[in-house]
Image: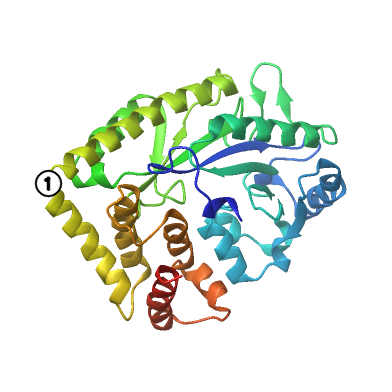
Amino acid sequence: MNWYLQNGNKSDVVVSSRIRLARNILEFPFETKCSKKDNYKIIEKLEQIIPSVGYGLKVLKLKDIDDLSKMSLVEKRLISPNFALKQNEIGAIAINEEENICIMINEEDHLRLQVFAPGLEIENLLKLAMEVDTKIEQNLNYAYNDKYGFLTACPTNVGTALRASVMVHLPALATTGNIPKILQIITNFGMNIRGIYGEGSKSKSDMYQISNKQTLGISEQEIINNMKIIVDKIIEQERLARKYLAKDSMELEDTIYRSYGILSNCKKLSSEESQELLSQVKLGTDLGIIKELNDLKVKKMYLYTKPANLQKYIGKQQNEYERDISRAQIIKKIINE
């Protein structure tokens, strides 16, 4: 089973974790100055060395991936929206069957090495990322400076070029009006907080992505330690807010079961509304209020109600109106499995 359908450590609040390393190859200009010829050579290099890296990784060129499958990867947060729209002939990914390792080739940097896991797993993910990175580095010359560390296309990534990010579900803090305070605390501690698809995206269904700002003058382990401190505090605050809401159990249960009732009985449902309703249903499942569902069913509903993955699930392309009808049908099917 793919990682995004599994449960992990502290999954009631932490949906997933990701470690991303930005790397550039010394012999080539940064991506903004790369010619198409250079891009082709970078892909060729990766095609040559990836088999020796292991982990079941395979190189796939974007031009060989259909648009629906690319958007499916975006919805799973395996590739960035901008990368999916990039000129097909100069982009590629190296990905394994479990999809917990995905390397974007010729994105903002020559390589964006990403590893993923359900729940709070940034410590273990760092070890995995460094293992994969070391194997790749045995075959490539990275752009590295003794004073500044790894050199990247964007100055904000210079140094470790490490971005640790954690996806958190904060419905109780949102309901109690405490999200602005949490945002302020996170910002004050040198962290970014964004929507589910990263920079420039909005929060949907009470999901927020927290990541480190600093990459220079700090070690990889320090970044992870700081992230864990912040995330543990957020988990604590969300759980306290849930206990506060549970004091008025009738109101909480009524809100949750109204959402569940709509999902169970509606004839058509938009993508945005389904994400909002699923936020309440996930909360109800995590608190043990909704007995009819389990974590796997909730994760399936989150994934297969998104436009591209919905169409891949049913095996055909549909317009928006048709998807709204199929979305309601898929939710009923998953609930009754």
Q: Position of residue 259 (x, y in %)?
A: 25, 64
Q: Position of residue 105 (x, y in %)?
A: 70, 49
Most foreground residue, 71 or 235: 235
The residue under label 1 is which amino acid type? Answer: Asp
When the figure is inspected, residue 127 is found, relative to residue 84, above or below; the finding is: above
Q: What residue appears at the point 32 percent right and 55 percent down from the top-left corner?
A: 279
Q: Position of residue 274 (x, y in %)?
A: 34, 66
Q: What residue appears at the point 68 percent right and 67 percent down from the top-left corner?
A: 65
Q: What residue appears at the point 47 percent right and 62 percent down from the top-left corner?
A: 300
Quick one: SS at disc 1? loop
Classify mark 1: residues with Cα within 10 Å, few (<14), some (14-19) or many (20+): few
Most foreground residue, 161 or 4: 4
Most foreground residue, 297 or 57: 297
Query: Does residue 130 appear left or right of residue 77 in this picture?
Result: right
When the figure is inspected, residue 284 is found, relative to residue 164, above or below; the finding is: below
Inspect this view and state whether residue 85 appears: no
Labels in figure, total: 1
Residue that badge 1 annotates: 248
Query: Does residue 170 appear left or right of residue 27 in this picture?
Result: left
> Could you say which quadrant of the image residue 54 lies in?
top right
Which quadrant would the N terminus be assigned to in this image?
Answer: bottom right
Q: What residue appears at the point 30 percent right and 35 percent down from the top-left corner?
A: 183
